[in-house]
Amino acid sequence: MSDLTVLDQAHAAMQKAPHDDTARLRFYERLSECQLYLMLTEEAGEDDQVTPELFEVDGARYVLVFDREERLARFAGKPTPYVALSGRVIAGMLARQGIGLGLNLEVAPSSILLPEAAVTWLHDTLGNQPDEVQAAISELHPPAGLPEHLVTAIDGKLATAMGLAQSAYLVRVTYDSGAHGHLLGFVGAVPEAEPALARAIAEALTFSGIEAGALDVGFFRSGDAMTQRMDAVGLRFDLPQLQEQALKPLSAPGSDPAKPPRLR
């Protein structure tokens, strides 16, 4: 059906294969990336504090989120205040608050109640930091043996990293120590964005069900000799670039990643 959302599709895949960890992880990845509409008791205040509507089901408390505005309106049946936030931000707000997440209840195929433990797990998983190591590369080869769904997940992550780097190369490497592995080498990354790019790739690994050690991340300048070597043998990803235009400052709750909204 053309009106199915990415969350509907990911939820259906998870329900179809309840014992498939990869399908379950992909659902949670989509949930973290999607913009969700969180139902509130009143309009968000200027102090970036929000008061979600809380619903009790079998003694547990839940907030309600929807992946389309019209789905929220259909559930509420009347004009209802809300705030649009990413699933990542909402998970951070709710983690360890004893509050679960009700998604698209009664209005979509992806209707599901996620308990507090699942919300906290998602927040903790998104907060995992990759390890930083120093290693010298002796040989580069074309990538080989990585699951296709991991390459697709990397491509999806990089498509959202607009303006954070020029490009990236996926290569198979041999280090001076004799160890072998794969490397995703970013070229021309904004220095301040390097930690975020490394976390994004770590998330791609986690939500693909791949061990973190399966892929290293490196950062290079366009004029580096290593960049030329990667270009000769690697799988190249071109990251989308920002258009040169004046941008209005964002002030809506949750629009500043360094200042997420708070629960009242």
Image (cartoon, rainbow, N blue to C red):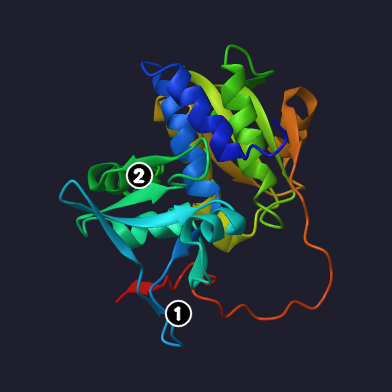
Q: Is residue 90 above or below residue 166?
A: below
Marker count (numbered): 2
Q: Mark 2 — residue? A: 122
The amino acid pointed to by label 1 is: Ala
In the rendered image, residue 55, in percent from the top left (x then y), is placed at 28, 58
Dot 2: what SS? helix
Q: Which mark is residue 44?
A: 1
The residue that appears at 51% across and 62% down in the rendered structure is 77
Q: Is residue 59 left or right of residue 140?
A: left
Label 1 to label 2, Cα distance in Å?
25 Å
Identify the secondary structure beneath mark 1.
Answer: loop
Task: Kindly report which numbered mark, 1 or 2, lies closer to the viewer in this rendering.
Answer: 1
* Left or right: 251 as drawn, with respect to 56: right
**Crowdedness near tag 2: few (<14), some (14–19) or many (≥20) residues, C-alpha within 10 Å:** many
Residue 209 percent location from the top left of the image: 43, 24
Asked if residue 199 shows in the view, the reply is no
Residue displayed at 42% across by 70% down = 260
Quick one: which residue is furthest to the top in this view? Answer: 145
